[in-house]
Image (cartoon, rainbow, N blue to C red):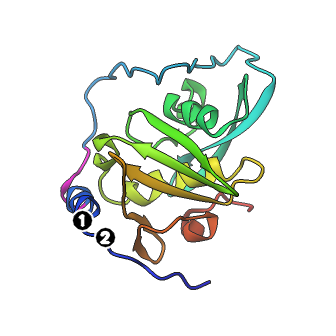
Amino acid sequence: MSRSHRHGRGPAALLVLLLAGCGVGAQAEPTRVALPAGSTPTTSGSTGGAFVLRVYFVRGNDLAAVERRADTATPQAVLDQLVVGPRRSEVASGVRTAVAPQELLATIEPPSEVVVAAGRDFANVGGANQLLAVAQLVWTLTELPGVRTVRFTVEGARVEVPTDEGLTSAPVGRDDYRSVHPPGT
C-alpha cells in the first residue's frame, strides 16, 4: 500500500530535528515515574479489572504482546497501561519499553482513528527506539475493536513519526510497522 509522505513545517520540522539529535542513554538507577491521572498499575499478583487488554512492549528488535487487566477497554486505558511499562517478571524475560515516561492522552476521531496528544517528552527517544516507540503505541491502540489508525500531535500540532517507509504526519496503522511486528503475526 503506497502512502504519500507529507513533510510538515513548523512544529513538525522542529520535532524531526529534536528526534534526530536526541539520544537516551542508559540510566544508572531507576527513576520514579508519575503515572497519568486515573491510571493504576497492575501488580503481577493482581487480577485487575474486568477487561483484558493486549499491550505491546519490545523484546529484542520486535514488538511483544503482553496482557493487562483494566476497568475499561478504551484508548486511554491501554495508553495508561503502556506508560506503566513492563512488570519485573517481564523485564527478567527480556521485555522492555521504548516509550519514554510521559503523559499521553487519547481521543477518538470517528470512524476509526485515535489521536495521541503528547508533550515535548515524546521527542526524547533516540535512534532505533523512535520507530519501536511509535510502533508500540500504534499496535497497542489498534488492538482495540474499531481502531484502524493513529495520528500524533505535540502541543496541538500534527507531527511526523517514523515508519518503515520514512517520516509521515499522516495517520499510521499496523502495516506501517511490519519490520517490527510481533513474531507469529
Question: Could you give the CA–CA distance between mark 2 and mark 1, rounded to whole angstroms?
Answer: 6 Å
**Residue at the top extreme?**
45
**What residue lies at 79% left-to-right and 29% top-to-bottom?**
51
Q: What residue is rendered at 63% in x and 16% in y? A: 43
Residue 91 percent across, percent down from the top left: 53, 33
Q: Amino acid at mark 2?
A: Gly
| 106 is within the stretch colored magenta | no
As displayed, is residue 169 above or below residue 154?
below
Q: Residues within 10 Å of mark 2 (few under 14, many from 20)?
A: some
The magenta segment = 20-24
- Residue farthest front in this picture: 110
Report which residue position mark 2 lands on.
Answer: 8
Label 2 with label 1: CB-CB less than 8 Å = yes
* Location of residue 110 in the rendering, given as x and y in whole percent from the top left corner: 67, 54
- Please count the marks in the image: 2
SS class of the residue under badge 2?
Answer: loop
* Kind of element beneath mark 1: helix
**Residue extending furthest toward the right:** 50
Looking at the image, which residue is at 58% across and 37% down?
Answer: 93
Res. 13 mark: 1
Image quarter in which the C terminus is found: bottom right
Q: Position of residue 24 (x, y in %)?
A: 26, 45
